[in-house]
Image (cartoon, rainbow, N blue to C red):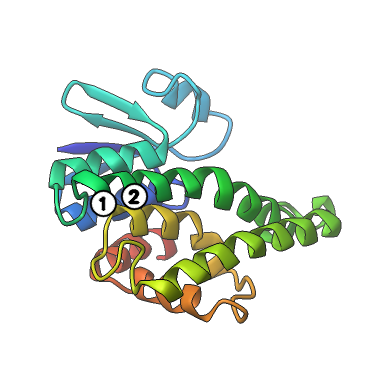
Amino acid sequence: MLRIHGIARSRAFRCIWAAEEAGQAYEVVPVGFGPGLKDAITPINPNGKIPALEDGGLVLFESLAINLHIGAKAGAPLMPAGDDGARVLQWTLWAATEAEPQAMQWAYNTFILPADQRDPALAAAGAASLAQRLAVLEAHLAAGGPWLLGTGFTMADCNLASVLYGAWANKFDLAPFPKVKTWLDAAFNRPAALAARKQREG
């Protein structure tokens, strides 16, 4: 059984969703934010952050790497081989390097930090940078779709959509990106995503 260390209201949400999509049995080992976080998680993740995964003798950190591992356990179609497997890796790294930094800059200065610590200029800059990335995604989905690799949902969709969950749930302006909005709505309303969202939002 997969042991996911973290809480659903963290990046562990991504791993819970992935496990649901993969049909893998899992348990969530509740490790939350706060002063005891590093002491609780460091034996599993030396970075002192959540989530982390135990799968038998394998211990992993980094949520998107965990998801790739979970996808590999399920195999195709969630984690395809060959060229499509390379495309899953491409979109996963794009999520981490292109989408997430911009989304988090916007999020921290829009709803995560206390109001008196938010910087509207940083929020605006993050939103503008994220919009540039979403324009790339919009064009890609318009040329193919409805999913990142075409007609079937893969771990690429789970990984990128989960990175964009905060923007989607907190009303980032997706009006200029109708294909992206349709894609996100479809992703987050899949049965596996709804099961993960119930843990996060409930």
Q: Nearer the viewer, residue 128 or 171?
A: 128
Near mark 1 (Cα within 10 A), the count class, few <14, some 14-19 or many ≥20, is some
> Label 1's element?
helix
Q: With 3 as the anchor, is 97 left or right in this view?
A: right
Left or right side of 110 for 17: left
Pick the residue in front: 111 or 62: 62
Residue drawn 56% across the image and 76% down it: 177
- Residue 153: tell me if it is visible: yes
Residue at coordinates 29% horizontally, 67% vertically from top-left? 150
Question: Dividing the image into 4 quarters, which one contains the C terminus?
Answer: bottom left
**Tag 1: amino acid:** Asp
Q: Quadrant of residue 175?
A: bottom right
The residue singled out by tag 1 in the image is 84
User: Residue 21: x and y, percent?
Assistant: 22, 57
What whole-number distance in Å separates the C-alpha atoms at marks 1 and 2?
5 Å
Q: Which residue is more in the foreground, 42 or 24?
A: 24
Horizontal and vertical percent position of residue 189: 33, 74
Query: Where does the image place residue 54, in percent across and percent down from the top left?
Result: 25, 29
Horizontal and vertical percent position of residue 160: 43, 55
Secondary structure at numbered mark 2:
helix
Using the image, determine if residue 119 lies above or below residue 52. below
Q: Quadrant of the N terminus?
A: top left
Q: Residue at x 83, y 60 (%)?
A: 120
Mark 2, residue position: 87
Side of 79 where 165 appears, left or right:
right
Q: Is residue 107 above or below residue 140?
A: above
Residue 112 showing in the rendered view: no
Say what amino acid the circle numbered 2 marks.
Arg
In contact (CB < 8 Å): disc 1 and disc 2: yes
- Badge 2: residue crowd in 10 Å (few <14, some 14–19, many ≥20): some
